[in-house]
C-alpha cells in the first residue's frame, strides 16, 4: 500500500478529523454540484467478535479489516476509525447507484473475510447502510448528522 495513503488513513482514524473531512467534502460537493456518499459497516452482531475486539482499534480484526477495505476502495475514498464496531467510508464524487455497487461488493468481500477470520457461515450478512448527498439528504447538515450518529 502507498505510504502516503497509509498516513492519510491514520489521520482519519480520529473521529473529529474524519468528521472535519466530511464537512470539507460536503462543501466541495455543493460548490461543484457533485455527489458524495457514505457507507457504514456494522460488525457488532457477530458473536465471535468480542466486545473488546470491536472497540479496540489496535486489534488484529480491525487492522485486517481496514487493510481489506483499503484494497477494495479507490485512493480518494476515506475510511473512518473503528468506533463501537462501526466503520464509515466516505465515497468522494460517488452518487447513490455507485455507492450501492460498492456496498454490494464490500458485502461479499467482508463475508469471505469473516469466514477466514472466524470460520463463520458464508450466509452471514454484514450490516451495511449507506446514504448519498444530494440524493438522500437535502442539506449538508442532515448528511453530516447521519454520518456523525453512525459513528
Image (spheres, rainbow, N blue to C red):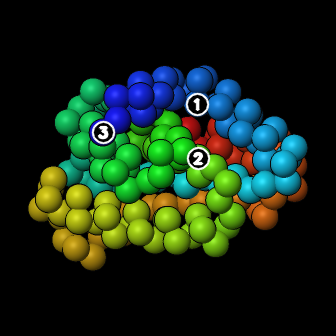
Please tell me whether mark 2 sits on a helix, a strand or a loop. Answer: strand
Secondary structure under the numbered disc 1 in the rendered image: helix
Q: Quadrant of the C terminus?
A: top right
The quarter holding residue 33 reads bottom right
The reply to whether residue 96 is visible in this rendering is yes
Residue 29 image offset from top left, x and y in percent: 79, 47
Q: On residue 1, which mark appears?
A: 3
In this rendering, is residue 95 above or below 33? Answer: below
Marks 1 & 3, CB-CB < 8 Å contact: no
Q: Residues within 10 Å of mark 2 (few under 14, many from 20)?
A: many
**Rendered image quadrant of residue 106:** bottom left
For label 1, the residue is: 18
3 or 2: tag closer to the N-terminus = 3
Up/down of 34 relative to 126, above or below: above
Q: Secondary structure at mark 3?
A: loop
Give the residue displayed 24% in from the left and 32% down from the top.
59
Q: Which mark is residue 90?
A: 2
| x 50%, y 37%: residue | 80
Amino acid at each position: 500500500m502507498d505510504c502516503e495513503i497509509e498516513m492519510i488513513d491514520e489521520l482519519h482514524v480520529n473521529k473529529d478529523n474524519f468528521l472535519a473531512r466530511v464537512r470539507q467534502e460536503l462543501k466541495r460537493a455543493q460548490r461543484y454540484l457533485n455527489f458524495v456518499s457514505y457507507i457504514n459497516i456494522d460488525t457488532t452482531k457477530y458473536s465471535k467478535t468480542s466486545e473488546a475486539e470491536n472497540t479496540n482499534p489496535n486489534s488484529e480484526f480491525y487492522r485486517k479489516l481496514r487493510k481489506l477495505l483499503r484494497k477494495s476502495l479507490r485512493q480518494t475514498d476515506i475510511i473512518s476509525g473503528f468506533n463501537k464496531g462501526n466503520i464509515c467510508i466516505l465515497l468522494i464524487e460517488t452518487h447513490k447507484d455507485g455507492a450501492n455497487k460498492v456496498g454490494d461488493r464490500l458485502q461479499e468481500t467482508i463475508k469471505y473475510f469473516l469466514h477466514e477470520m472466524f470460520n463463520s457461515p458464508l450466509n452471514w450478512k454484514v450490516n451495511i447502510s449507506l446514504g448519498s448527498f444530494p440524493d438522500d439528504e437535502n442539506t449538508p447538515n442532515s448528511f453530516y448528522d447521519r454520518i456523525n450518529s453512525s459513528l
